[in-house]
């Protein structure tokens, strides 16, 4: 178990851990923004926006993440989009996660009683105000539990990036295996890192749920 | 509402098709040409008597089980749609099998990854292993080697128009792609280059074709295979900077089998089959055949 202390392994491990956090954090923020925007599109009165939202969710939620990575990492350069692999990974992850966030938010929007929107409209609010000030805040608070599942899955989904030249936690496992260390301790250390991440995120959401949950 | 839904579905289909269309254009072997015509055939010996446990086992079952690679074009490649295997390593396997008394139909090829080779040989899952298997002292402790039948070395694959990269001293500051965690990657880092790492060399080659990386590095034999697949776009630099003697792997203490395989390699090197097999496979890359290596009998 003390293999992390030899041969510069700890710096590899730490770099992988930080990279996973960085990748997940950036993708989480982007996915949240994207998901909120897509959800707004899907309930908006403009048909074109609704079609766009539906298409996005249909394509990105139904494509296996690995395939999506392939399309981004190997497809975009053919369209003359040249970015580093970390950015490619962020694009793939947030596009994928954003589609799930959108659907969770939309389910939340459906739980908000229709009277709320009608009341807002009768006060003279437009669609944007109704959604942003009245409906979405209530919807977001209702869906904290399913939302936490999406964001706990995110760092683990980020492991796919390890196969696409991003030096995150999963690629640490490959480097250490190639160095010839025993598989079980490597597994335990890497699993530990993911456990720390998952527990932190679920803890954060439990805290938010206690503070924000809607009592009906 | 119904029309809207139809439009949404249609758009989704179009978007998915567009994503799918980003893959490789045309058949992957389109540029390789039909090499099968030039491959040599080997006379199968009858009445072979070798005091080897593995061989007796193979004879009893009528099948010689040989481990090989399946993802190295012109070296050890399996066309999964037809189930046929081609390449230089496969030819070596057929030559050896012929001299041991097994026709190509009696060979049962099994794909075994690098990491599992020693285990597969020790457990007797396979009788022989032919697949860019570098002979070294560490491995000799657990398995036996006949050969070497080819001496590869770490080299660089670049775009045909590239004149910047001429060898290991010109990789400084360049972005070179190779397999995750391999010794090739370590060498490039020591030489001052940056690395891009994927699980498979084919992904590196794709990145080289789109210009994301400056070169791909690993043993020259593997690189020649990819160059043979894209002879108009890629070339091997041809300045190898390590020595990787490839051998035929087998169970450790089977001296009779080791001698027999060495004799088989010698016979086919002498009668010109070796050169013919090279020309019809790796030779398509444009790189001339290297000298036949001296067998290391031990």
Image (tube, helix red, strand yellow):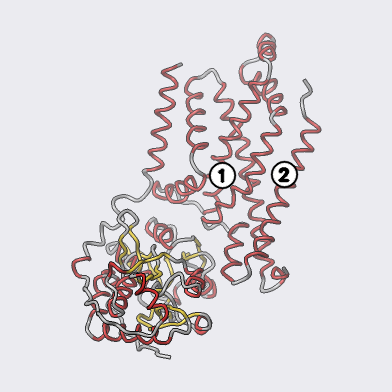
Identify which residue, B76 or A175, lies in the foreground: B76
The subunit letter for the residue under badge 2 reads: A
Residue A93 is labelled as 1
In the rendered image, the quadrant that contains the C terminus of chain A is top right
Residue projecting furthest to the front: B60
In the rendered image, the quadrant that contains the N terminus of chain A is bottom right
Residue projecting furthest to the left: B37
* Image: B195 above or below A193: below
Helix, strand or loop status at disc 1: helix
What percent of the width, then of the height, locates residue B243? 43, 82
Q: Residue at horizontal 38%, vertical 63%?
A: B70
Relative horizontal placement of residue A204, taking residue A22 as reference (left or right): right
Residue projecting furthest to the bottom: B298
Residue B7 visible within the image: yes
- Callout 1 environment at 10 Å: few (<14), some (14 to 19), or many (20+)? many
Residue A201 is labelled as 2
In the rendered picture of this protein, how many numbered marks are placed on residues? 2
What percent of the width, then of the height, locates residue B178? 47, 66
Identify which residue, A69 or B281, lies in the foreground: B281
């Amino acid at each position: 178990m003390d293999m992390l202390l030899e041969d510069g392994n700890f710096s590899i491990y730490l770099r992988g851990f930080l990279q996973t956090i960085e990748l997940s954090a950036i993708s989480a923020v982007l996915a949240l923004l994207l998901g909120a925007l897509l959800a707004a599109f899907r309930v908006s009165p403009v048909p074109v926006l609704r079609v766009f939202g539906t298409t996005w969710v249909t394509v990105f939620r139904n494509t296996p993440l690995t395939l999506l990575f392939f399309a981004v990492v190997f497809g975009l350069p053919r369209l003359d989009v040249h970015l580093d692999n970390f950015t490619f990974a962020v694009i793939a992850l947030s596009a994928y996660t954003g589609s799930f966030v959108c659907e969770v938010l939309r389910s939340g929007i459906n739980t908000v009683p229709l009277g709320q929107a009608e009341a807002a409209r009768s006060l003279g609010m437009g669609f944007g105000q109704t959604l942003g000030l009245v409906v979405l805040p209530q919807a977001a608070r209702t869906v904290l539990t399913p939302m936490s599942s999406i964001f706990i899955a995110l760092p683990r989904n980020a492991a796919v990036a390890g196969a696409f030249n991003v030096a995150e936690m999963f690629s640490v496992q490959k480097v250490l295996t190639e160095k010839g260390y025993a598989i079980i301790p490597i597994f335990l250390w890497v699993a530990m890192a993911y456990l720390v991440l998952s527990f932190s995120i679920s803890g954060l959401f439990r805290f938010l749920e206690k503070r924000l949950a809607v009592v009906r | 509402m119904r029309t809207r839904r139809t439009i949404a579905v249609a758009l989704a289909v179009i978007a998915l098709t567009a994503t799918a269309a980003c893959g490789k254009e045309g058949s992957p072997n389109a540029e390789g040409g039909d090499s099968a015509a030039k491959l040599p055939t080997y006379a199968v010996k009858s009445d072979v008597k070798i005091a080897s446990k593995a061989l007796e086992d193979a004879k009893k079952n009528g099948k010689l089980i040989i481990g090989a690679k399946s993802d190295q074009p012109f070296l050890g490649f399996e066309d999964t749609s037809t189930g046929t295997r081609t390449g230089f390593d496969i030819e070596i396997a057929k030559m050896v099998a012929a001299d041991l008394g097994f026709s190509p139909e009696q060979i049962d090829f099994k794909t075994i990854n690098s990491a599992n080779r020693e285990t597969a040989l020790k457990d007797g899952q396979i009788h022989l292993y032919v697949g860019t298997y570098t002979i070294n002292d560490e491995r000799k402790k657990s398995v036996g080697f006949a050969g070497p039948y080819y001496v590869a070395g770490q080299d660089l694959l670049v775009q045909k128009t590239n004149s910047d990269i001429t060898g290991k001293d010109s990789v400084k500051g360049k972005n070179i792609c190779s397999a995750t965690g391999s010794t090739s990657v370590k060498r490039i880092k020591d030489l001052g280059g940056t690395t891009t790492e994927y699980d498979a060399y084919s992904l590196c080659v794709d990145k080289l074709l789109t210009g994301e990386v400056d070169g791909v590095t690993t043993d020259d034999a593997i690189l020649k295979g990819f160059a043979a697949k894209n002879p108009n776009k890629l070339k091997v630099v041809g300045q190898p900077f390590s020595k990787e003697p490839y051998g035929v792997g087998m169970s450790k203490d089977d001296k009779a089998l080791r001698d027999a395989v060495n004799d088989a390699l010698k016979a086919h090197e002498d009668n010109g089959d070796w050169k013919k097999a090279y020309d019809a496979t790796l030779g398509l890359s444009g790189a001339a055949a290297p000298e036949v290596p001296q067998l290391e009998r031990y």
